[in-house]
Amino acid sequence: MRRFRFRRHSLLPGFGPALGYTLLYLGLLVLLPLGGAVLKAAGLSWADFWRLVSGPRAAAAFRLSFLAAFGAALINAVFGFIAAWVLVRYTFPGRRFIDALVDLPFALPTSVAGIALTALFSRNGWIGALLEPLGIRVAFTPLGVLVALVFIGLPFTIRTVQPVIADLDREAELAAASLGASAWQTFRRITLPAVLPAVLTGFALAFARGIGEYGSVIFISGNLPLRTEIVPLLIVTRLEQYDYAGATALAVAMLALSFVMLLTINSLQAWSRRRR
Amino acid sequence: MNPFRPPIRPVPLLLTLVALLFLLGFLALPLAIVFAGALQQGIKHYLAAISDPMALAAIRLTLLAAAIAVPLNVIFGLAAAWAIGKFRFPGRQLLITLIDLPFSVSPVVSGMVYILVFGMQGWLGGWLAARGVQVIFAVPGIVLATLFVTLPLVARELIPLMESQGTEEEEAALTLGASGWQTFRRVTLPNVRQGLLYGVILCTARAMGEFGAVSVVSGHIRGLTNTLTLHVEILYNEYQSAAAFAVASLLALLAVVPLVVKAILSRHEH
């Protein structure tokens, strides 16, 4: 009779210690503290929890965080797709340089991004001065939050869509064209369906990142309660006032949201892999 | 008209212009303004800002946090990639998702969970305080928050790499009489060295550049619990814009390193 095995047979040694260490490290650093936060919130009654996450200030913060993250992800989905297409399909001077630059928002500390964007979009900044005569103010308005989240989410769509465009079957496009399809028809019927799962994955990743973003937003937003205050900032404000119950309630709501986004992203990625 | 010359196509031209405007506007301009802002009052002022004692204290703390966080996360990344990349077991996918968890949590929440555990009102805070150990608003808290946010970086570079390389080479080494440790050191490590190098660089850059999580646990005590990113914030809020950008330019240079390394590595691939 075969003995039950937890893992498939392998010649290689060291599975036990490696997995054990992985679980211990992950457990101590991530799972225990996160679990502790959730337990702390579990000490709140449902009514208290609801009051803490739905008061006027919290509701306004959630609305702004949600709308700005959604808008930024949408802008990144559209322009990120165009940028990915251009970076893969066309050659132009400086392409490698620009391609390398795409990862900048991953690497640049968010406080640096925050003060740079604020300087760029303030009324006498390089871009802000151009927008001022048009009556558009970015810094210290909800629009500023949007701009910061576009910057932070920029690499996600590009980096998820790029490999898919590179792998596209060009013969299918040529076949469609030779059968008389217009360029637009070829794009809509052949290219878009193949790339769509990756675009949606990028959208979800950018949205998830945007909801929780803190550093790059707080400088450009001006942080006016009810108007330009995002949820992570409200958490920090409550922590600074030693309102741990209020901060925990918001944090747990955010954690639940991240968890839903994580599940969404995983199923989108699975769908994307099946499509390819 | 020469039929072999490609016609000038307006759509690619238009798309390229849109993409370049978008990318340069959102990437090159912010990077450029950091350096322009840093030098707005001249090189003398720049050097004074980055050699200020508070700035030097911030540099020291930032280096310390990275010096602790990076090696620990490298060991974790190697162990996790060995277990997940080279073996098949139930729950593998779930484990990968859990390792990615710090990426999907808001940095503010990451810092806050440590306050709930180690803060004065937290699970362990009172017990530790009675023994004279302070974690929150002190250096250990900053190290913990840095560990948390950089935890996935090395593992996530190595797991797909080890998985794609399979186990045949290791099996060959073992059959030829190498010990498990020899096999790992002589076969596995050299095979993943590029991914490891990139992971380490990315992890270092992130460890030195984390802001949100560190900000929550730091308490912003100047000279004591102030990292470089927090120093940027303090200077900026005190309207010392040139000094803030000067310190920020150090961090921006640091952030460019992984981009350059990645570009060089991908050039070798082709």
Image (tube, rainbow, N blue to C red):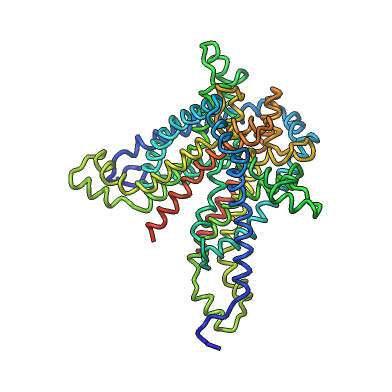
Q: Residue at x 75, y 31 (%)?
A: A52
Can residue A256 be seen in this snapshot? Answer: no
Residue reaching furthest to the left: B177
Residue B61: percent from the left, percent from the top?
A: 50, 27
* Residue A187 sits above or below residue B88 on the image: below
Judge left or right: residue B76 versus residue A56: left
Quarter of the image where one finds residue B141: top right
Above-or-below relation of B236 to B30: above
Q: Nearer the viewer, residue B261 or B128?
A: B261
Q: Is residue B192 left or right of residue A146?
A: left
x and y, in percent, of residue B213 in the image: 58, 33
In the rendered view of the protein, which quadrant contains the N terminus of chain A?
top left
The quadrant holding residue A200 is: bottom right
* Residue reaching furthest to the bottom: B1
The residue drawn where x is 40% and y is 46% is B158
Question: Is residue B26 in view?
Answer: yes
Q: Position of residue A169 (x, y in %)?
A: 49, 71
Residue shown at 63% from the left, 58% from the top: B22
Question: How many discs mark residues in the rendered view?
Answer: 0
Pick the front one: A123 or B230? A123
Task: Indicate left or right for A238 with B13 as reference.
Answer: right
Q: Nearer the viewer, residue B270 or B149?
A: B270
- How far across and down, in percent of the image, does residue A198 sit? 56, 59
